[in-house]
Image (cartoon, helix red, strand yellow):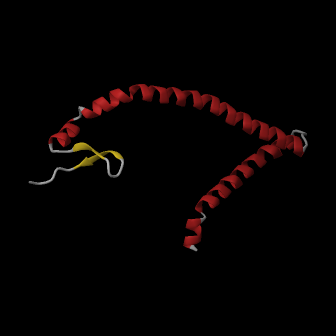
Amino acid sequence: MVLFLYETRLALTISAAAIMLAVALDHVVRWLETRKLSRAAAIALTVVGVILIFVGLAFLVIPSAVQQLRDFINAAPKILDGLRHMPWFRAARTRGWTSTRDSRTRCPARWTWPREP
């Protein structure tokens, strides 16, 4: 039983969220029905309202996320330079950590620990 629940956790989570959303939206539809709207019109109005809310949230979130991504890309060289000058990074470099190319595995860079003499 536990394995079944573990394997189906995504489907169960989505189903539980859908049930909660349906119950919440049913309250809105019933409230609109008490205002003398037919059930079909109340459902249509509720769906349009939910879509408008999602579109509004997208218009609020997406431009901000794009601007933050641009700022991060522009600041990345400064951030990396700052990391290179951190004491722990300098200490790791002086202890023998080096960046080498490994042509056998086609790995562009690999950190290696120096061998003991």
Find the residue positioned furthest to the bottom.
1
User: Residue 16, how many percent across, how many down?
Assistant: 66, 57
Determine which quarter of the picture holds residue 100: top left
Residue drawn where x is 69% and y is 33% of the image: 55
Is residue 8 rendered to the left or right of residue 84? right
User: Residue 85, how many percent across, how many down?
Assistant: 23, 31
In the displayed structure, would residue 67 be above or below residue 86?
Answer: above
User: Residue 70, how many percent across, how many down?
Assistant: 48, 26
Q: Is residue 107 visible?
A: yes
Q: Quadrant of the N terminus?
A: bottom right
Is residue 72 rendered to the left or right of residue 90? right
Residue drawn where x is 58% and y is 68% of the image: 5
User: Residue 99, how many percent across, how many down?
Assistant: 25, 42
Residue drawn where x is 42% and y is 25% of the image: 74
Q: Is residue 34 visible?
A: no
Observer-nearest of 16 and 61: 61
Is residue 66 rendered to the left or right of residue 40? left
Q: Quadrant of the C terminus?
A: bottom left
Observer-nearest of 69 and 36: 69
